[in-house]
Amino acid sequence: MAQNHPASRSDSLRPQIAAVIATYNVAPYLPDFLASLADQTGGLHHVQLIFVNDGSTDDSEQIIRTWIDEQRVLATVLSQPNGGVAAARNAGLEIVDADWVTFCDPDDVLASDYFSQVTKFLDIYQDESVSVVCTHLMPFDERTGERTDSHPLRHKFQKGSRVINLHVEPTVHVSAGNTFLRTSAIDDLGLRFDTRIRPNFEDGHFIARYLLGSNTHRLGVVSSAKYYYRTRGNGSSATQTSFLMEDKYTTLLRHGFLALLQEASRQQSVPRWLENTVLYDLFWYFKNELAIRSLTAAAPKHVFDEFHELMREILDLISDDAIRTFDAMGVEFAVKETFLKGYRPEPLRPDYVRLNDVDESRQEVHLTYWFSGPEPTEHIVVDDEVVAPLYGTVQEYQFYGRTLLKRRHLWIRRGLRSLVHLDGLQVSVVRGDQWGHAESLTYKQLNPTIIGQRRRHKAELDPSQSLTRYMRSRAGKTLLSWRRNLDKQKLTSDLTAIKFHAPSTRRRFEDAWVFMDRNTDANDNAEHLYRYARAHHPEINAWFVLERKSEDWDRLKAEGFRLVAYGSAEWRLLILHAAHLASSHADAYVVSPLDGRRYGRPRFKYSFLQHGITQYDLSRWLNIKPIALLVTGTRAEQRSIVESSPWVFSDREAVLTGFPRHDALLRKRQATIESDRDAIVIMPTWRQGIVGAALKGSNERLRNDRFMESEYAQTYLRLLHDERLRTIAQTERRRIVFMPHPNMRPYLADFKLPPHVEVLSYRDADVQHVLATASTVLTDYSSIAFEAAVVDVPVVYLQFDAHEFFNGMHIGRRGYFEYERDGFGPVTTDVDKAVDAIADIASNGFRVAPEYERRTSEAFPVRDGRNCERVIGAMKALDGAPRIVELDAVRQVGVHV
């Protein structure tokens, strides 16, 4: 172990604080951290700096040594083989010579007055009752540089610097980076970081053992000392990647959470602060499973059984009241209910049903209830008549490969008096989910009552108020009123309200049906459905929404589309009057177009036309959308949604109609002669991790300047430069066309391609024309394969990065569709195999192989060109019209295709 010892210090110069800084491959981040050390108010003479280089393979150690020489600070640098952050901190603890010790992370940043604020606090609270001090943890995004007070545990800093009694306020604190501990207490306990606790929680485990061992319950909070915690833009931090590691699900639970609870239960009853500490980390496991994007999708499956057994043991040691009343952060009802009931040996049986919604157009009522195990028997009575549910589904909550909780959704007809019996017992009907009552009266219960009382008793004239205070209050209210009156957004909403009530506006937009694809592009399901509605349903007040600067605007305007510019004043009036909104996209800017605080909840019923056939699990994204109609294109797709699954939708919402654009695609393909079907089309989808962040309220994204370094870009460059592929195209008299997903458009010019490759964007070319003239389509995971299959174009899949694509950080997880079993062509994993597959297709005359022809027939019940008609019928059914006949029924009655 190499050491660089500081100069010797006399006892009178003994530092008050030691900072042990575990360092491993942080060279890109060290300059910011070291600069924040150098900028400390009052210097660093009272701080012992101990850097522990934990086997870095980059130049982290050299950067630190150079900085020490330049700054002329007294510091120690230790070097050791890589052993993890716990081992590195333990090495640093061996040479600590200060009253207090902290463990800063070298990829973070300290405020310039960080140590001076802590020192000031320590001087004020010199007595022994405070032996743990924490500073204000604030995340900062390295991509934007933005620093926000948004950490889930920020609430303990909102009352300023103070001392918290953990018995009264059982606060969670799990980070050693912003914690200061008494070294005398650490030495008395012989305490060290447990090297078995990895890939994280070593901090929380160390602090909890410190608190238990020293029998202290007072936590000092220094709100004025800001510790800026870096969130890495490349997702490489231990916290971000820990969900991919086996130890996260086994060793950490056994030696971390379970061991702590067992130790506490042997000493005394488990303190609430410790229950909250363990719950805080455990809840993140399950919250991430419900998140739209999460690496838990790629968690190691072979450790799931052990994980669930450890979870059962841990929850046996945590009180139900701790779970019910936990409020350190927001936790979904389903997660808390799973912790309360999901691991018990007996199944959860419902004792209430929840009233969720009433559809006044169709006079139907939506009810839900929670259960586990077998589905309860249902006996429903509406107005003295036994009825069956009109629609229903079971939503499964699967966590780490195991279904622990289920939620039944059912629709019944509306009546004057309805009774629900489950498993033979009548259950209550409530308007909100319930999980029992708290055992103690806390701030969580008091605060709403206090606020309510203050609002009720608030008066203009308060006898206890002095003249000076009254005048200040009046002046403040007057200024606030002036600011509100001058507020541009408020002025906009006021003008909108005036125009909204104008008779001319009402006549123009009354009960409007609004159609929209992206705000920036058209030529998707909404465009095709609008065109059909205008041609065949003159009774529908149809409008199409698009940005005025879109390249599709002039094309649609020339065709006679009734266009409204997205984001305009006219658009706001249209949306406010709309009875229906139908879009091929479900992004927030589509489904929640206006500020609800200003304009209220939308009146329109939202129909999701989809951009592509749903082939993987998008439930985490779409379950929270206000979807009244979800258009599906294949029977397997619809079945995967409406049957027991993670989805909330039943066959009431998910209707098998076929896609509107497929009607036109079939016509175009049929009109294209064989000799014109001459394109080998390469159409990959996008990757979340290599495109820039989305701009709020739009489909546009920031540019990633390192895009071309990605495996994605390099793979398609190799494919498009492949000599065998060029030879196949020349021999067979075919064109090679490269047309990636619209999100890849900003990078098309960066692909330096040979002259025989045509590069097309979705803005410049009609994708349906491209497919109609295709002889083969190569894609990866894109639903474009379904588009090719529906018109009998041979398909090849190139899936070189399947593990990364389905790691949870893209928008979906693996679902019902398995490419080898269900796909419409061979699945390849590299460029050479993909070219081999294209060569095989060419040798077969560019015809679909019998196996894939059979799969296509099974996927699409009929191809009769009447999908638009069925979708319009399904939308009208939302207003009470008869339900349409779906595709499966059409096939069964023998309609010709």
Image: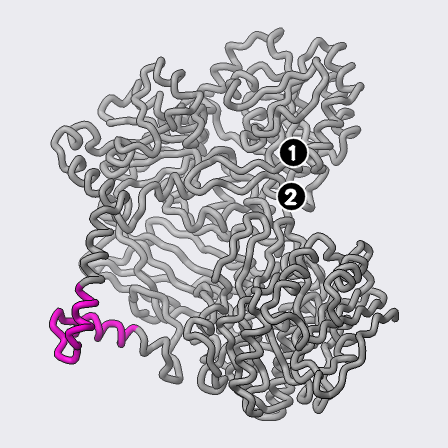
Q: Sequence-wise, which precedes: disc 2 or disc 1?
A: 1
660 with respect to 821 (left or right) = left
Query: Taking the image as drawn, is residue 894 in sight?
Result: no
276 with respect to 58 (left or right) = left
Q: Disc number at residue 805?
A: 2
Kind of residue at badge 1: Asp
Give yes or no for contact between labels 2 and 1 (Cβ–Cβ under 8 Å): yes
The answer to if 836 sits in the magenta stretch is: no
Q: Can you tell which quarter of the image residue 169 is in?
A: bottom left
Q: Position of residue 823 (x, y in %)?
A: 63, 34
Q: Position of residue 821 (x, y in %)?
A: 66, 38
* Residue at the spot 79% in from the left edge and 65% down from the top edge: 53
Task: Determine whether 9 is above or below 103 in the image.
Answer: below
Q: Residues within 10 Å of mark 1 (few under 14, many from 20)?
A: many
Q: Which quadrant: the N terminus?
A: bottom right
Kind of residue at badge 2: Phe
708 with respect to 763 (left or right) = right
User: Depth check: 74 or 479 in front?
Assistant: 74
User: Depth check: 152 or 250 in front?
Assistant: 152
In magenta, the rendered stretch is 448-474
Q: Can you tell which quarter of the image residue 34 is in?
A: bottom right
Q: CA distance from mark 2 to mark 1?
A: 10 Å
Q: Position of residue 812 (x, y in %)?
A: 56, 45
485 with respect to 777 (left or right) = left
Task: Determine whether 459 is above or below 382 in the image.
Answer: below
Q: Secondary structure at mark 2?
A: helix
Q: Which residue is mark 1?
A: 780
